[in-house]
Amino acid sequence: MESNAAPAGPQPPHVVYDTLSKAHKAAPQLKPIPAFEVYKVAREEELAAYRMLCRVLVMHHGTSLPKAQQRILDDMGEELCIGQVRQSLEKEMAEHDKVLQGIRKSGVLRRRGDFTDGVEEMTVEDYLAEAPKDDGNGLYMPVPKAPRADGADSGAARATAAAAAAAVGAKRKGHIHAAVSKLAKEIESAGNNLLLSASAREEQQLIQLLQQKREALLALRVELTEA
């Protein structure tokens, strides 16, 4: 676990992040969250990081990456244990993203000075002062109350299933909200490109893209209602 500061945002009431000795003294009794559950969260972060790296490199260099950038992508895939098939799919998705193509064609990244003039970058010293550090804490959750003897197994199973269902539901909603935020940014970018478009063909493509994003938002709305 990495973070010398308190975890950002309010913690769920059924999860405790603390040292083992304090967790044992807590009421109700707590038990460690299985390591695999923690790993799944870490794996999602790794895949998201690789996906964003693909998108940024394609946004800067187009579909044919220079050797140096391709090497960065390959090294990161190896470091994060991402298979060749998944690497190819992530890069292909980035290459076919209309928003990234629009940003590259707009040339704003070549005029970075127009937007950053007078803006001070964070120094290395400031970054290191706030960099997260391992505090030796872990994640713990309450142990379900002991059921009656005649239904011990079924009661425990129901409690475990309910907890798992709640966790899955919260995680699903989190993914939906993240997808909505991403779509909102893409719609804003496409709308700006549409305003600056100089050709009828490009306008038609952007209008079709906005229509696709609208349909995706409607689908997420239905999914969020069912979650």
Image (spheres, rainbow, N blue to C red):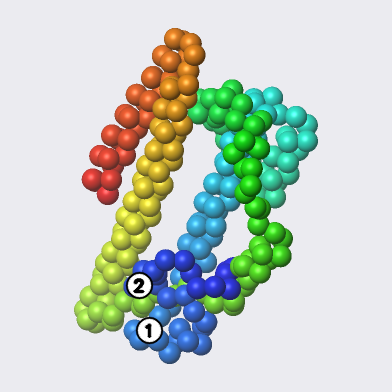
* Amino acid, disc 2: His
Where disc 2 sits, the SS reads loop
How far is mark 1 from mark 2, CA to CA?
A: 11 Å
The answer to whether the residues at label 1 and label 2 have Cβ atoms under 8 Å apart is: no
88 horizontally vs 34: left or right: right
Compared across the picture, whether 162 is left or right of 102 comes to: left
List the single residue furthest toward the right. 68
User: Badge 2 is on which residue?
Assistant: 14
- As helix, strand or loop, the secondary structure at mark 1 comes to loop
Can you see residue 207? Answer: yes
* Numbered circles on residues, count: 2
Q: Report which quarter residue 147 is drawn in.
A: bottom left
Measured as percent of width and height from the top left, residue 159 is found at: 28, 69
Residue indicated by mark 1 = 29
Q: Quadrant of residue 151?
A: bottom left
In the rendered image of this protein, does residue 96 appear above or below residue 11? above
Label 1 sits on what residue type?
A: Gln
145 in relation to 183, above or below:
below
Residue occupying the point 48% across, 11% down: 199
Name the foreground residue: 208 vs 47. 208
Image coordinates for residue 22, horizontal then vertical, percent = 47, 87
Q: Label 2: few (<14), some or many (≥20) within 10 Å? A: few
